[in-house]
Image (tube, rainbow, N blue to C red):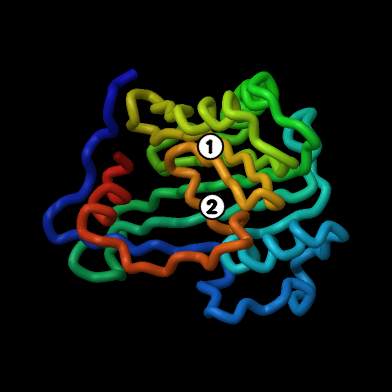
Amino acid sequence: MSDGDPADGDAGTADQEVDSGRGDPDESLEPAEDDPDVPEWDDEYFDRVSDRLMYNYDLEKDVRAGDEPFALGGEMRMLNKKHFLHPSITLGEHESFEYVYARRQPAVRVPDLERLVELGHDLADERIDPSEDHFSTEFVFVLVTESIPEEVASFVGEFSQRELLNYGYYGHYEIHLVVVAPEDERIEASRGAHVEEAFRLWAPIEREEPGLFDLITRRLQL
């Protein structure tokens, strides 16, 4: 596999992203129970997290990914359309997917995280249809626990998993890890696990406009 993705984009073309979510929330989030399509969780923490995720993810309660059970599951699909000169002239479409799985676990150890990484690879084999239409798929695993051991924090902080498909011509997939201890107001997330903000209930979601470098990085998936 190559170390980078093939460059795309031609002169006179424009990209348009279509998000399958419900739109961006305003500062005063509406409770998830106001939306009949969003489940309710008896666990107050997950119920509040769902209030943050519901605008961009299709959410499910008590799901399984492979043989692993999770209290919360979320899926987001984005369609990127490339146009030439005019929106009516479409050169191609690229799909991106993100799956989020979260559950409580009294104690977290490094082998638990390694097992989830293997699950991510299995899900990639099962769900990704390698083709030129596929751009990216991300799997994010979130464990909610009482405290975070330093070896777990170190493993998550150093973890990075990105696999190119057919040298990047069929896109790529990524695996992300998040471990959160709400009582300690502490969260550890691997690089690129942007959804971790939704699980940081003790802090507001940042709404800063991305800078030029952020936009270029996001476009090139660096």
| x then y, percent, for residue 132 | 38, 38
In the displayed structure image, the side of residue 189 where residue 104 appears, left or right: right
Residue depicted at x 55% and y 47% = 98
Q: Is residue 7 above or below residue 209?
A: above
The amino acid on which the numbered mark 1 sits, given as a three-letter code, is His
**Quadrant the N terminus occupies:** top left
> Within the image, what quadrant is residue 11 found in?
bottom left
Label 1: how many Cα within 10 Å (few below 14, some 14–19, many 20+): many
Q: Position of residue 168 (x, y in %)?
A: 34, 30
Give the amino acid type for the residue marked by disc 2 in the picture: Val
* Residue under pointer 1: 176
The quarter of the picture where residue 136 lies is top left
Task: Determine whether, in the image, residue 145 is placed left or right of residue 18.
Answer: right
Seen from the viewer's position, the closer of residues 180 and 185 is 185
Tag of residue 155: none
| Front residue of 4 and 104 | 104
Residue carrying label 2: 195
Is the C-beta separation of discs 1 and 2 under 8 Å?
Answer: yes
Q: CA distance from mark 1 to mark 2?
A: 10 Å
Q: Nearer the viewer, residue 155 or 63?
A: 155
The residue lying at 64 percent from left, 22 percent from top is 110
Q: Is residue 220 left or right of residue 142?
A: left
Q: At 61% across and 35% down in the image, what residue appears?
A: 127
Q: Secondary structure at mark 2?
A: loop
Callout 1: SS:
strand
